[in-house]
Image: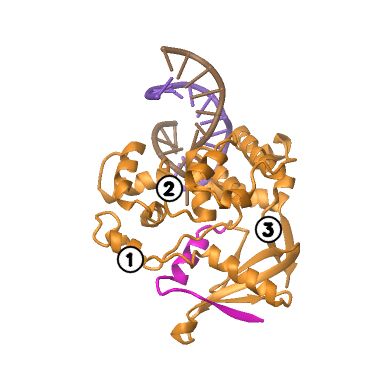
Chain colours: A orange, B brown, C purple
Amino acid sequence: MEFVVAAPLEFSFDLCASFLKRSPRELLHRFENDRVRKLLHLKDRPVLIELCESKDLSPAQRGITIRALNTTINTEERAQLEKYVREWFDLDTDLKPFYEKVSADKLLGELVTKFHGYRIVGQPDLFESLVWAVLGQQINLAFAYTLKQRFVEQFGTSYEFEGQHYYAFPGPEVVAQLTDAELLPLQFSRQKSKYTVEIGKAFAEKVITQEALSSMPLEAARDTLMQIKGVGNWTANYALMKTFRYKDAFPAEDVGIHNSIRLLKKSKRKPTVEEVRKLFKKYKGWEAYATLYLWKSLP
DNA sequence: CGCCAGGTTAGAG
DNA sequence: CTCTAACATGGC
């Protein structure tokens, strides 16, 4: 059972795949050759999907081929899978206006040519976005992936298929019950432990729901998220960019953005947050994508 | 060894 | 309102 999800011309499967391949410790998807496998739960039923680029079809069929490996799926589930994949790779955003806007830009002009078709690979689940952002606060990415690997192995759900284990992120009801005694041994700091559980509680008690936030403007959604202890401006904007794809979300405090600008401008020092905000005014409406391409420029 | 890392908070001035 | 220490430890 397989079908194709159409993708626009401004989409590069390879570039998005390179993002997904950036850590060997990532458990939430797995590559087999050039195919990505990911475990999903449709109405609590585990469905293992495999995606690959649809290359050798007619241009109208250009896109991503989806296959369900462990089960057959009905029409409704097929529609859900298509929706998931369209969201995951942000296929519904038209990048042409962004490319036109920055084609002659000093910082982004070359980057958007070099990485044409690169899109924000998202995290369709808001809770997962937030926890992952907290894990990445103030530490290097390699270590953040180590923490996430331990966290998912211990508290997530797993599913075995053809001798391989596939994992899904733990739900808020599980995370809300965790304690320092369980998280500190994974080398969470007390702070990360507290923030992670706070987020779990906010979602488990439905103080925050993905559905309620999905209809809000960026500022309202950001302010709602920032009421959770541990979620600051960087974390909120990161999650909103990855989950809801607000094109104007951007984590201005991000050290990756700062380093990228410093390197591209061959400057000795990193810009301040205020300087970044000023610089980003010319990307208005496309801050999330400006951020993505700056990240991509980093070594 | 030293510096930095996909930040946030509480508390002081 | 702005500034700072504390958080904690891996990676290079």
Give the image location of residue A27, x and y in percent: 63, 58
User: Range of the magenta residues?
Assistant: A1-24
Residue at horizontal 29%, vertical 50%? A282
Residue A249 visible from this viewpoint? yes
Residue A73 or A136: which is nearer the viewer? Answer: A73
Please state which of residues A104 and A248 is positioned toward the viewer in this rendering. Answer: A248
Marks 2 and 1, Cα distance to the nearest angstrom?
22 Å
Image position, residue A295 (x, y; %): 40, 53
Does the segment drawn in magenta span residue A80?
no
The residue singled out by tag 3 in the image is: A168
* Up-down relation of residue A163 to residue A104 (above or below): below
Q: Residues within 10 Å of mark 1 (few under 14, many from 20)?
A: few
Which residue lies under the disc numbered 1? A114
| Chain letter of the residue carrying label 2 | A
Q: Label 2 is placed on what type of residue?
A: Phe
Residue assigned mark 2: A250
Label 3: state its secondary structure: strand
Residue A7 lies in magenta, yes or no?
yes
Residue A299 in view in this figure: no
Q: Quadrant of the C terminus of chain A?
A: bottom left
